Amino acid sequence: MNVLRVLLVVLLFPTLAFARVQNTPKAQNGAQPTGFRAEYIANLDDVEKKLVSLAEATPAEKFTWRPSKDVRSISEVYTHIAGSNYFLASFLGVEAPQIEGDLEKTVTKKADVIAELKRSFAHLRKASATVRDLDAPVKMFGNQTTCRGVLVTVVSHLHEHLGQSIAYARMNGVVPPWSH
C-alpha cells in the first residue's frame, strides 16, 4: 500500500505542480505574484481561455443546438456568460454597458457571440481592477457579502458554465482544444 502511495505522489506531483505554475501569472520582474488577487486573475485567465477556445472550436451551425427545447442553446450559454459578466461587475460598482434587448436572443451569430464574450471578459477584468478593499461590504442578491465574495461568485459562475459548455460540445462531437 505504501509503495502505491509513493508511486502516485511521484507520478502526480509533477502534473499538479505544472498545472499550478501554468495557471499562475508572472509579475513584470518575473516573480510569481501571490495572494487572492493573483489567484483570481490566474483563474479568470484560464476559464476565459477555455470558454473562448471552446466557442471558437464549435462549428457555427451548432450554435443553435440545445439538448432540449426548454434549455439554453450553445450561443445562449455563451451570451448568458457575457451578460452575467457585465451584471456581476455591477456589484463592484462598475456599470454594465448599455445593451439593446436580450443578449441571449439578439446576439446569435458565432462571430458576434465570441466578440461579446471577449468584451465581457475585458469589462469584468476592468471592474475587478477597481477593487481596492477585498473585504469591503457588498449587498448581492439581497445578501451581505464582500468584494472578494463577488469575485468568488464570478469564477464559480464561469466554471459552472464551462462545465455545461464542455458537455454541450462533446454531445456535438467537439473535443475541448486544451484536452488534446
Image (spheres, helix red, strand yellow):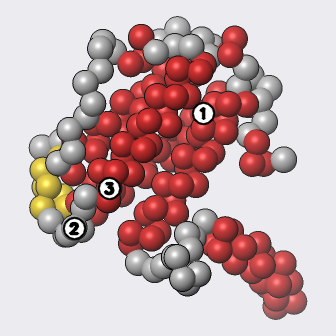
Residue at disc 2, secondary structure: loop
Q: Identify the mark at residue 173; answer none if there is no mark.
A: none
| Residue neighbourhood size for the residue with mark 3, other residues' Cα within 10 Å, grouped as few (<14), some (14–19), many (≥20) | many
Q: Where does the image place residue 92, in percent across and percent down from the top left?
A: 21, 51
Crowd around label 2: few <14 · some 14–19 · many ≥20 (10 Å): few
- Front one among 59 and 119: 119
Q: Residue at x 75, y 80 (%)?
A: 13
Between marks 3 and 1, how big is the CA–CA gap? 24 Å
Query: Secondary structure under badge 1?
Result: helix
The answer to which of marks 3 and 1 sits earlier in the sequence is 3
Q: Which residue is mark 2?
A: 132
User: Is 139 left or right of 174, judged from the image as shown?
Assistant: left
Pointers 3 and 1 in contact (C-beta within 8 Å):
no
Which residue is at a point 32% across and 59% down the rendered structure image?
129
Q: Quadrant of the N terminus?
A: bottom right
Residue wearing tag 3: 128
Q: Which mark is residue 165?
A: 1
Q: Is residue 6 above or below residue 78?
A: below
Give the CA distance from mark 3 to mark 2.
9 Å
Residue nearer the viewer, 128 or 28:
28
Instruction: Give the amino acid type for the residue marked by disc 3 in the picture.
Output: Ser
Left or right of 2, for residue 130: left
Q: Residue furthest front?
A: 28
Identity of the residue drawn at 51% across and 59% down: 43
Q: Compute the Cα span from label 1 to label 2.
A: 33 Å
The quadrant in which residue 132 appears is: bottom left
